[in-house]
Image: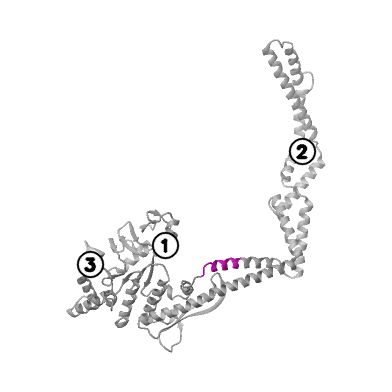
C-alpha cells in the first residue's frame, strides 16, 4: 500500500507531502489543477516514466520519495536479493538538470532494472484514453496465464525445445545425399592422413627452433669453446695444470691449518674445473656441423608451420582437430545407424513437447471458462447485461509458452457478432470493460495499489452508480487511488485529497491537501456536479450522494 509521497521541484509541485490511506482514495480538483501530476510523480519514482521536462523551472534537481507499507511477500523477496529488506519500503529518485538520476531503495543505491522489478509488484494503473495493456492482443496470453497453475511445465517445455534443436542440428550435420557424405568422407580421410603422417609431437616445434639455432651458430660455438678449452686444459700454462702444481706445493705444508685449507679448496676447484672442461668438450663434439641435418630440420619446421596454419594455431589444436575429424568420419561411416537413433530420439522429444503443450492448453481452456463467467458477471453489475465475452484460441508454432495464440473477443449487445476486444468497445464500454477486467485479474494477483485516472469519462447516470460501487468494492481488497469527475464515484471515497493551483510571487504552484471534514467533501462533490456556481440544490444533491456513499448504497 502506498503510504506517502514526497514531491520536490516536480512540475508545478515545489515541496509537497501527500499521505494516502487504505480503501478508496479520491483525488479532487479542477481541470488543470495538477491532479494527474501526482500519478506522474509516482510513475517517476517507480521508474515507469523519465521526463526531464517535468523538472520545475529554475530548479537544479527534482526528487520524489514514495513509502509503501505493508508490502507483499514478492516485494520482500526482491528486497532480500538486494540486502535491503525491511518492514516497509522507501524508494527515492532524484533527477538532476543534466539528466543524471540517482535511485535508492531503503537507503541503498539501486539500479533502474532492479527498481522496475520491484515497481511491477507495487501498482497497477488504468488511465483515461491510454492504450491499456489489457486491450492489446499480444498481452492476452499473459493475463490468461495468471489464472493457470502450470508449475514447472513451462521450464520443462523450454528444456525439451532446446534438446530438440540440438538433435536437429546433429541430424543436419549427418544430412545430405550419399554422394555428399562420400565427398565429406574423402576430405576427412585426406585430412586425417595428412596430420597422422606428420607424426606431430607436442612441444616439437620449440625443440626444432632450439636445435636449428644451435646448428646455425656452429662455427661461432666451435671457435670460442675451443679457445676456452685451450685456456683451461692445453699446454703447460693452462689453468688446470697451474692449479694442480699449486695444490701440490701447498700440500707439503699441511701442518699449517690455514695452508691446508687453501690446498683443500684448490683441490675442490680442480675437480669442478675438470668436470667443466669435460662437459665443454662433450658439447663441442655433439655439435656436428651437418648441413644435411640442418636442411632436414628446416623442412620439418616448414611442414609443422604449414599444418598449424591449415589446421590450427598450435600443435595441440592440430591434434585436437585430428581427433574431431576421426569422430566425424566414424559418424559418417555409421551415419545410417546414427541417423536412425537421432530420429528416434527426436520423435520421443516431439511427443513429450506435444504432451506438455496439450496439458498447458487444457489448463488455459479451464481458465478461459472461469474468466468468461467472472467478466460477464462484472459487466452485468456495471449495466451491461447482454455483454458476451469469449477467449478465442488459435494454434501457432509452439514455443516455451506452448502452441496457443489467444485473443479476447467481445460483444456488448445481444445477437451481435463477437469481435476483437481492442476493436469493438466504445469509450464508455471500454472504461467498464477495463474496470471489470482489472477487478477479476486483480483478484488473482498479489495485493497492489490500483490507480484510476478518469476512466469514468463519458459515463453518467445509473452506470455511474454501478461503477462507483465497483470501485468501492475493489477498495475493500486493494488500495485504490482514483482521479474522477464523476460525483457518484467521488461520493463513495474513504479518503479525500484536494489539488488546487495557486499563484504566489508571480509563480504558479500546485498544492495538495487532505479534506478532513464532511462539509468540505460535500462542497467539492457539488463543484463536480455544477462547476463554480454552486446552488443549494447542488449541495443538497451532493449531500445525498455523500450520505448514500457512506452506506455504500449508491
Which is more toward the observer, 494 or 277? Answer: 494
**Residue 168: percent from left, percent from top:** 65, 68
Which quadrant is home to the N terminus? bottom left
User: Can residue 175 be seen in this snapshot?
Assistant: no
Which residue, as the protein is rendered here, is positioned at the far bottom? 415
Determine crowd level at label 1: few under 14, some 14-19, many 20+ residues with C-alpha closer than 10 A.
few
Q: Which residues lie in the magenta part?
A: 150-162
* Secondary structure of residue under mark 1: helix
Circle number at residue 73: 1
Residue that appears at 74% across and 11% down: 252
Circle number at residue 516: 3
Which quadrant is home to the C terminus? bottom left
Q: CA distance from mark 1 to mark 3?
A: 33 Å
User: Can residue 254 be seen in this snapshot?
Assistant: yes
Residue that appears at 43% across and 72% down: 133
Which is more toward the observer, 72 or 117? Answer: 72
Q: Label 2: which residue? A: 215
Q: CA distance from mark 3 to mark 2?
A: 103 Å
Query: In front: mark 1 or mark 3?
Result: 1
Amino acid at each position: 500500500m502506498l503510504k506517502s509521497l514526497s514531491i520536490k521541484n516536480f512540475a508545478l509541485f515545489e515541496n509537497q507531502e501527500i499521505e494516502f490511506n487504505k480503501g478508496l482514495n479520491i483525488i479532487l480538483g479542477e481541470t488543470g489543477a495538477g491532479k494527474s501530476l501526482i500519478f506522474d510523480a509516482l510513475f517517476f519514482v517507480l521508474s515507469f516514466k523519465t521526463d526531464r521536462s517535468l523538472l520545475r523551472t529554475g530548479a537544479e534537481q527534482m526528487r520524489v520519495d514514495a513509502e509503501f507499507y505493508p508490502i507483499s511477500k514478492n516485494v520482500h523477496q526482491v528486497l532480500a536479493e538486494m540486502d535491503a529488506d525491511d518492514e516497509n519500503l522507501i524508494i527515492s529518485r532524484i533527477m538532476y538538470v543534466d539528466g543524471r538520476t540517482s535511485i535508492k531503495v531503503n537507503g541503498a543505491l539501486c539500479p533502474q532494472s532492479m527498481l522496475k522489478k520491484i515497481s511491477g509488484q507495487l501498482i497497477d494503473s488504468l488511465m483515461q484514453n491510454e492504450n491499456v495493456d489489457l486491450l492489446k492482443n499480444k498481452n492476452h496470453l499473459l493475463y490468461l496465464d495468471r489464472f493457470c497453475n502450470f508449475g514447472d511445465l513451462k521450464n520443462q517445455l523450454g528444456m525439451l525445445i532446446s534438446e530438440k534443436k540440438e538433435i536437429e542440428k546433429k541430424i543436419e550435420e549427418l544430412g545430405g545425399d550419399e554422394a555428399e557424405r562420400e565427398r565429406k568422407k574423402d576430405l576427412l580421410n585426406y585430412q586425417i592422413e595428412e596430420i597422422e603422417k606428420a607424426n606431430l609431437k607436442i612441444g616439437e616445434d620449440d625443440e626444432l627452433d632450439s636445435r636449428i639455432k644451435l646448428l646455425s651458430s656452429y662455427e661461432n660455438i666451435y671457435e670460442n669453446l675451443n679457445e676456452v678449452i685451450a685456456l683451461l686444459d692445453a699446454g703447460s700454462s693452462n689453468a688446470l695444470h697451474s692449479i694442480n702444481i699449486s695444490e701440490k706445493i701447498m700440500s707439503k705444508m699441511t701442518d699449517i691449518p690455514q695452508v691446508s685449507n687453501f690446498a683443500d679448496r684448490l683441490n675442490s676447484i680442480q675437480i669442478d674445473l675438470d668436470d667443466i672442461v669435460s662437459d665443454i668438450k662433450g658439447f663441442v663434439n655433439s655439435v656436428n656441423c651437418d648441413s644435411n641435418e640442418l636442411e632436414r630440420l628446416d623442412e620439418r619446421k616448414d611442414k609443422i608451420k604449414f599444418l598449424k596454419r591449415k589446421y590450427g594455431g598450435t600443435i595441440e589444436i592440430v591434434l585436437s582437430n585430428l581427433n574431431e575429424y576421426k569422430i566425424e568420419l566414424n559418424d559418417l561411416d555409421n551415419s545410417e545407424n546414427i541417423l536412425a537413433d537421432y530420429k528416434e530420439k527426436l520423435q520421443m522429444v516431439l511427443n513429450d513437447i506435444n504432451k506438455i503443450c496439450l496439458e498447458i492448453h487444457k489448463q488455459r481452456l479451464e481458465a478461459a471458462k472461469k474468466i468468461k463467467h467472472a467478466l460477464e458477471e462484472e459487466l452485468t453489475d456495471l449495466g451491461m447485461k447482454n455483454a458476451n465475452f469469449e477467449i478465442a484460441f488459435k494454434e501457432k508454432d509452439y514455443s516455451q509458452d506452448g502452441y496457443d495464440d489467444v485473443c479476447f473477443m467481445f460483444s456488448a449487445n445481444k445477437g451481435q457478432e463477437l469481435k476483437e476486444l481492442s476493436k469493438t468497445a466504445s469509450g464508455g464500454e471500454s472504461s467498464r470493460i477495463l474496470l471489470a477486467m482489472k477487478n477479476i485479474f486483480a483478484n488473482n494477483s498479489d495485493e497492489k495499489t490500483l490507480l484510476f485516472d478518469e476512466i469514468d469519462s463519458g459515463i453518467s447516470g445509473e452506470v455511474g452508480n454501478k461503477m462507483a460501487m465497483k470501485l468501492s468494492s475493489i477498495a475493500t481488497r486493494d488500495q485504490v487511488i482514483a482521479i474522477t469527475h464523476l460525483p457518484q464515484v467521488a461520493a463513495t471515497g474513504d479518503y479525500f485529497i484536494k489539488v488546487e493551483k495557486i499563484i504566489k510571487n508571480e509563480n504558479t504552484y500546485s498544492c495538495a491537501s487532505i479534506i478532513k471534514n464532511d462539509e468540505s467533501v460535500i462542497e467539492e462533490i457539488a463543484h463536480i456536479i455544477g462547476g463554480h456556481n454552486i446552488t443549494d440544490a447542488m449541495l443538497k444533491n451532493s449531500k445525498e450522494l455523500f450520505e448514500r456513499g457512506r452506506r455504500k448504497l449508491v
